[in-house]
Image (spheres, grey):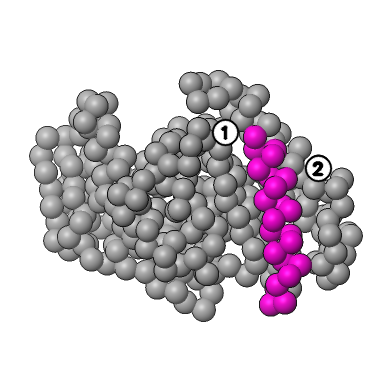
């Protein structure tokens, strides 16, 4: 295994173009586990730790630009206000040591259906900025995951940053596992209310071959909120609306049975998480005089 250690972003892009099979590594919280257990033996390993711009973030008027290597700890300590859903997800990642090393860019690169950041990114409607020597492009998060641990990156591309709209309404994230830390989620759910556009977005993890949105549940809830005048009145949601949203969210899953849980349990748990998060976010929206 050859070790590449570029000192600048342009050097990294050139190295990736010359060696498309090179596996990028920053925190190493996923890649090194696979290498240590001899599950992966890449021809080239590319260390990105010397590239400072990957650890930079910037909060703009409408979006946050998050460098690919910004660690989870920094996200929940510094960006909880503009990115509440992602901050909640970041707090659930493994142990403090791993949160100090792991990053959203690494999570996206691995593209595991169980990646903790993915439901929050789907709910927020993020875009992934990728680049190669051929140029840069942004990939909407809805089109980023292409299969089990597969993403839309070309062989010569690297993830540079993630662009996420600053929250204009309440967001939530929660997952089910055997404990709060050092555990892969049995299932996870993220929800974001977008009062500015009167839309709702969701994200589901560990309950399908890829992270997915519960689009049917979203469409139902958007229609129910509009038809019932809930956005304007901020009145409590009816039990029937909450129940149907949970049912549709659970139906959006395509889980499997494995050592962490059965498919039936995952569907049930996603429905429970969806119901709880809808109640939590709506109560927060009702009390937020800035929303709407």
Taking the view exactly as shown, the residue that stands out farthest to the front is: 179
Q: Quadrant of the C terminus?
A: bottom right
Taking the view exactly as shown, the residue that stands out farthest to the right is: 228
Q: Looking at the image, is 259 positioned above or below residue 281?
A: above
Residue at left 76%, top 37%?
247
In the image, residue 287 lies in the stretch drawn in magenta: yes
Residue in front for this viewpoint, 165 or 85: 85
Element at label 2: helix
Residue at left 55%, top 25%?
261
- Residue 201 in percent (x, y) is at 65, 54
- Residue 245 in percent (x, y) is at 76, 45
Please give left or right for residue 150 compared with residue 229 in the image.
Answer: left
Residue at left 39%, top 53%?
104
Query: Do the residues under discs 1 and 2 have CB atoms within 8 angstroms?
Result: no
- Residue 51 in percent (x, y) is at 21, 62
Q: Looking at the image, is 149 positioned above or below residue 286?
A: above
Please identify, in this view, whether the residue under mark 1 or under mark 2 is nearer the observer: 2
Residue in front for this viewpoint, 255 or 160: 255
Please give left or right for residue 23 compared with residue 268 in the image.
Answer: left
Which residue is under mark 2?
Answer: 243
Most common SS among magenta residues = helix
Asked which quadrant contains residue 33, the reply is top left
- Residue 123 in percent (x, y) is at 59, 54
Instruction: Report whether residue 260 is seen.
Output: yes
Residue at left 52%, top 35%?
177
Q: Quadrant of the N terminus?
A: top left
Residue in front for this viewpoint, 149 or 272: 272
The region drawn magenta spans 269-291
Q: Looking at the image, is 268 positioned above or below residue 12?
A: above
Q: In the drawing, what numbered circle is on residue 207?
A: 1
- Disc 1: CA contacts within 10 A as few (<14), some (14-19) or many (>=20): many
Of the two numbered discs 1 and 2 on the same chain, state the one appearing first in sequence: 1
């Amino acid at each position: 295994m050859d070790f590449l250690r570029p000192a600048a972003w342009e050097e990294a892009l050139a190295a990736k173009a010359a060696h498309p099979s090179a596996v990028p590594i920053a925190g190493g919280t996923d890649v090194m586990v696979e290498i240590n257990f001899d599950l992966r033996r890449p021809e080239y390993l590319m260390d990105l730790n010397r590239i400072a711009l990957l650890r930079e973030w910037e909060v703009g008027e409408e979006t946050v630009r998050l460098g690919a290597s910004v660690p989870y700890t920094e996200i929940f300590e510094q960006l909880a206000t503009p990115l509440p859903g992602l901050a909640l997800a970041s707090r659930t990642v493994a142990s403090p040591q791993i949160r100090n090393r792991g990053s959203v860019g690494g999570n996206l690169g691995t593209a595991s259906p169980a990646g903790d950041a993915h439901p929050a990114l789907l709910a927020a409607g993020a875009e992934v900025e990728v680049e190669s020597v051929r140029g840069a492009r942004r990939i909407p998060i809805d089109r980023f995951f292409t299969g089990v641990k597969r993403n839309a990156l070309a062989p010569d591309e690297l993830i540079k940053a993630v662009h996420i709209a600053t929250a204009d309404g309440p967001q939530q994230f929660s997952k089910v596992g055997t404990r709060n830390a050092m555990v892969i989620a049995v299932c996870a759910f993220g929800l974001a209310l977008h009062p500015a556009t009167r839309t709702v977005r969701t994200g589901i993890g560990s309950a399908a071959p890829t992270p997915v949105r519960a689009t049917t549940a979203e469409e139902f809830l958007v229609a129910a909120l509009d038809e019932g005048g809930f956005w304007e009145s901020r009145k409590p949601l009816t039990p029937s609306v909450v129940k149907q949203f949970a049912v549709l969210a659970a139906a959006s899953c395509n889980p499997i049975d494995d050592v962490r849980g059965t498919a039936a349990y995952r569907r049930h748990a996603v429905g429970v998480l969806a119901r709880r998060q809808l109640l939590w976010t709506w109560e927060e929206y009702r009390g937020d005089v800035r929303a709407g």
